[in-house]
Amino acid sequence: MHAADAIHGDLGMIQSNDVVICISKSGNTPEIKVLVPLLKRTGVVLVALASQTNSYLCLQADFVLNAHTEREADPLNLVPTTSTTVALALGDALAVSLLTARGFTSQDFARFHPGGSLGKKLYLKVSDIYPHHEIPTVSLRATVHEVILEMTSKRLGATAVADENGQLAGIVTDGDLRRMLNRFNLPELGDLHACDIMTPSPLCIHPDEYATHALKIMQERSITQLIVAIDNQIKGFIHLHDLLKEGLV
């Protein structure tokens, strides 16, 4: 609220249980001298943020934040530059102190700031993403040809491998296929099965984990997908491209 606008109607937004922080370099402007008595009449707590602590504003305030500056940055020492920067820094310090005092958590931030990548990092979960994908899955005895077809049709660059009880046994990725070509001769490929080329006991993530945790695992392990599972039951996949699309990377 601008001090000049306050005395022309905006003062109506001030309530008796409010805390009002008046920001003024000199603390002696005509607008401040008119406004302060009106504020005190409402019974608010008045905090002065000013450069001159012996000013009218500071002497009338309940609390004073000393924003003293020796001079402004411009050659004429006239343009508000240094003083505005100091006021911003003090305001940020005050806001952070209040966050700590009130026990403000990341969950609170996500509730009030759900938009953009900042909010998504705090509320988006794996369960919000993986259901959009098909679930590439093959059996332990699937042939290499079947493995490649499953990976290609589901377009995730990998397939889960399930045992006869439907439990997760492993994963076959593009990297596993490349390693297969290095390990086996071409005539041998027709005799291979998923169990021969898979990576057993693959990394998994629970649906209730935050998407940022999935991203951290992928970055640390230099992988591009994770199987989503609960107690070794395959639920789906989450891919690095999903996190890119959500703006988390």
Image (spheres, grey):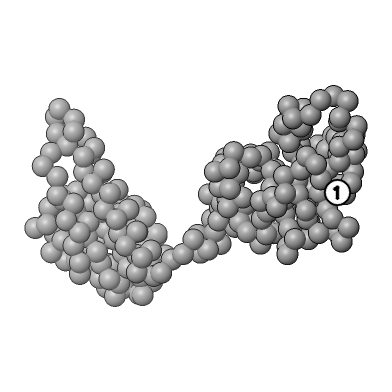
All told, the count of numbered labels is: 1
Residue 43 picture location, percent across and down: 29, 75
Q: Label 1 sits on what residue type?
A: Leu
Q: Quadrant of the N terminus?
A: bottom left
The residue depicted at 79 percent of the width and 29 percent of the height is: 184
Of residue 136 and residue 36, the one placed in the foreground of this image is: 136
The residue depicted at 87 percent of the width and 61 percent of the height is: 165
Of residue 114 and residue 223, the one placed in the foreground of this image is: 223
Furthest residue toward left: 54
Would residue 140 appear left or right of 88 to someone viewing this image? right
Residue 215 seen from this side: yes
The residue depicted at 46 percent of the width and 64 percent of the height is: 105
Quarter-of-image position of residue 179: top right
Would residue 96 appear left or right of 70 to someone viewing this image? right
Q: Helix or strand or loop: what does disc 1 sit on? A: loop
Instruction: From this view, report whether residue 25 is shown above or below residue 156.
Output: below
Quarter-of-image position of residue 147: top right
Instruction: From this view, report whether residue 24 is shown above or below residue 20.
Output: above
On the image, numbered disc 1 is attached to which residue? Answer: 140
Furthest residue toward top: 186
Would residue 195 appear left or right of 120 to someone viewing this image? right
The residue depicted at 36 percent of the width and 75 percent of the height is: 17
Q: In which quarter of the image is the C terminus?
A: top right
Residue 238 picture location, percent across and down: 71, 47
Determine crowd level at label 1: few under 14, some 14-19, many 20+ residues with C-alpha closer than 10 A: many
Of residue 232 and residue 70, the one placed in the foreground of this image is: 232
Residue 248 seen from this side: no
Residue 173 picture location, percent across and down: 74, 38
Residue 48 picture location, percent across and down: 22, 60
Instruction: From this view, report whether residue 209 is shown above or below residue 86.
Output: below
Of residue 58 and residue 170, the one placed in the foreground of this image is: 170
